[in-house]
Image: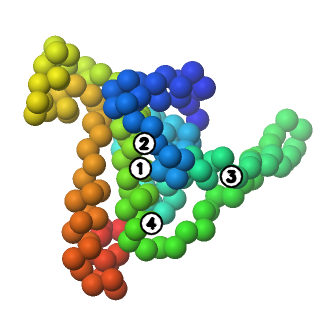
């Protein structure tokens, strides 16, 4: 996990850049943001199972219990898996949550970025100003899946 101040700073940077207020059903959990931030810092992006992406709602409604293994050694037991239907809507919602986590963790200014005033120009390439910009391409995927028959929608998406 990121430290409390690092996590707060990350969320504040995201707010300053995008001015978005997200509901807990979509907002990434602190653990998801922390994992993604470590990947970006180490420049080691990993393949991640979409069904394991956690939201803030899951974080707030579950509890972590510490189990004692020996003196001074504890392990956290919690509900690791959220019970959710494996359908196309849930898949795309979790994909959007993961992309939000990447955007939150990568919203710090990019090294060697041009003058910040250039970012305000219409059509400016946001990849020159931040490490991971928020691009909402999941909407394109959602629109594309809606033209397919219901039985083929989830199979069409890259799992």
Q: Residue at (42%, 42%) from the top-left corner?
A: 101
Point out the tag, 4 or 2, that comes first from the N-terminus.
Answer: 4
Q: Residue at (21%, 77%) from the top-left corner?
A: 147
Residue 117, by quadrant, is top left
| In the image: residue 131, left or right of residue 96 | left
Structural distance between the alpha carbons of marks 1 and 4: 12 Å
Q: Secondary structure at mark 4?
A: helix
Q: Which mark identifies residue 101? A: 2
Q: Which mark identifies residue 61? A: 3
Structural distance between the alpha carbons of marks 3 and 1: 19 Å
Structural distance between the alpha carbons of marks 1 and 2: 5 Å
Q: Which residue is mark 4?
A: 90
For residue 55, above or below residue 51: above
| In the image: residue 12, left or right of residue 67 | left
Structural distance between the alpha carbons of marks 4 and 3: 18 Å
Q: Secondary structure at mark 3?
A: helix
Q: Which residue is mark 1?
A: 98
Check contact, mark 1 vs mark 4: CB within 8 A.
no
Where does the C terminus fall, quadrant-wise?
bottom left
Point out the tag, 4 or 3, that comes first from the N-terminus.
Answer: 3
How would you rate the neighbour count of disc 4 (Cα within 10 Å): few for under 14, some for 14-19, many for 20 or more? some
40 and 10: which is toward the camera? 10
- Give the percent coordinates (x, y) of residue 26: 47, 50
Check contact, mark 1 vs mark 2: CB within 8 A.
yes
Of badges 3 and 2, the one in the foreground is: 3
Structural distance between the alpha carbons of marks 4 and 2: 16 Å
Q: Residue at (20%, 16%) from the top-left corner?
A: 116
Residue 96 seen from this side:
yes
- Give the percent coordinates (x, y) of residue 57: 59, 50
């Amino acid at each position: 996990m990121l430290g409390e101040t690092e996590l707060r700073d990350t969320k504040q940077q995201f707010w300053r850049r995008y001015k978005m207020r997200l509901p807990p059903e979509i907002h990434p959990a602190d653990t998801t943001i922390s994992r993604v931030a470590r990947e970006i810092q180490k420049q080691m992006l990993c393949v991640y199972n979409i069904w394991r992406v956690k939201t803030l709602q899951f974080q707030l409604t579950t509890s972590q219990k510490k189990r004692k293994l020996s003196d001074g050694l504890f392990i956290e037991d919690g509900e690791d898996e959220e019970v959710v239907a494996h359908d196309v809507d849930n898949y795309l919602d979790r994909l959007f949550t993961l992309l939000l986590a990447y955007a939150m963790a990568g919203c710090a200014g990019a090294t060697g970025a041009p003058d910040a005033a250039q970012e305000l120009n219409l059509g400016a390439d946001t990849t020159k100003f931040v490490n991971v910009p928020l691009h909402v391409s999941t909407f394109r995927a959602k629109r594309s899946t809606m033209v397919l028959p219901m039985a083929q929608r989830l199979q069409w998406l890259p799992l």
